[in-house]
């Protein structure tokens, strides 16, 4: 690799994007990760060189079962409920394959899985980001990298887990065990699995109801303006 153009090509970054970031003196976290991968460097180790993430490597550890299960979609959970109802104690081969992650609800799912009860309030107090702004990010299925790491610090979980949920880092890069989600689900009793499915559907219902209400309000507003 001899030139900046070579680096951009290998990292999948536009030269203009990197140039603008360098001029501003602030390279994005995603750019750092892409460059690290292009140079065959560990992204977690590379991010740890920056002040905001200096404890990232030291604070990295395996995810909890709750974090693993948070990365399973409600559809997969329902499929597993059905599979168990048809065949008690099914073999791993007989179970439906889990969907890839991160998925649409990964960020919010992870945040709620590690929330001790006042995570939004503590995170807002530490970072200065208003709770409503945090809620807006979570509703949109995203969370700024620094916020994800700080949330993990508050919750006492692996500092890299939130970066997996946001899609910045891969599960392999952060030491997530192969088939870890499957093993975490296997440890749930049938009753616990059904209750998990109920909770996921209840949360989904609230989201869909909010969307429907917003659409109705928008339609009413347009009618008034029209």
Image (spheres, rainbow, N blue to C red):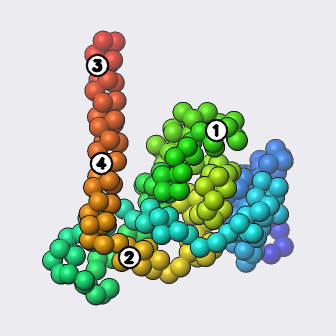
Tell me residue 193's x, y (percent).
30, 66
Q: CA distance from mark 3 to mark 4?
A: 27 Å
Give yes or no for contact between labels 1 and 2 (Cβ–Cβ under 8 Å).
no
Give yes or no for contact between labels 3 and 4 (Cβ–Cβ under 8 Å).
no
Task: Say if 170 sits above or below 203 in the image.
Answer: below
Residue that numbered label 2 is attached to = 187
Quarter that holds the C terminus: top left
Q: CA distance from mark 4 to mark 2?
A: 23 Å
Q: Decide if residue 19 is in sight here.
A: no
Residue that numbered label 3 is attached to = 220
Q: Which callout, 1 or 2, points at the residue further toward the start of the chain?
A: 1
Tell me residue 136's x, y (percent).
51, 38
SS class, disc 4 = helix
Mark 3 against mark 4, which lies toward the viewer? 4
Label drawn at residue 202: 4
Q: Nearer the viewer, residue 29 or 192?
A: 192
Residue that numbered label 1 is attached to = 124
Crowdedness near tag 4: few (<14), some (14–19) or many (≥20) residues, C-alpha within 10 Å = few
Q: CA distance from mark 4 to mark 1?
A: 26 Å
Q: Which callout, 4 or 1, points at the residue further toward the start of the chain?
A: 1
């Amino acid at each position: 690799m001899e030139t900046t153009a070579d680096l951009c090509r290998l990292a999948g970054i536009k030269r203009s994007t990197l140039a603008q970031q360098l001029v501003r003196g602030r390279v994005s976290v995603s750019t750092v990760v892409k460059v690290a991968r292009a140079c065959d460097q560990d992204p977690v180790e590379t991010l740890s060189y920056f002040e905001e993430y200096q404890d990232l490597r030291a604070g990295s550890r395996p995810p909890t079962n709750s974090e693993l299960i948070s990365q399973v979609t409600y559809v997969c959970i329902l499929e597993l409920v059905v599979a168990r109802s048809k065949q008690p104690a099914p073999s791993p081969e007989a179970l439906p394959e889990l969907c890839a992650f991160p998925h649409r609800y990964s960020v919010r799912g992870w945040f709620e899985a590690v929330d001790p009860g006042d995570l939004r309030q503590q995170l807002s107090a530490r970072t200065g980001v208003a709770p409503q702004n945090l809620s807006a990010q979570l509703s949109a299925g995203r969370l700024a990298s620094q916020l994800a790491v700080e949330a993990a610090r508050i919750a006492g979980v692996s500092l890299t887990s939130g970066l997996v949920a946001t899609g910045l880092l891969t599960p392999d890069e952060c030491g997530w065990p192969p088939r870890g989600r499957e093993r975490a689900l296997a440890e749930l009793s049938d009753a616990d699995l059904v209750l998990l499915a109920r909770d996921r559907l209840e949360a989904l219902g609230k989201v869909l109801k909010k969307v429907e209400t917003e659409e109705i309000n928008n339609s009413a507003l347009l009618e008034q303006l029209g």
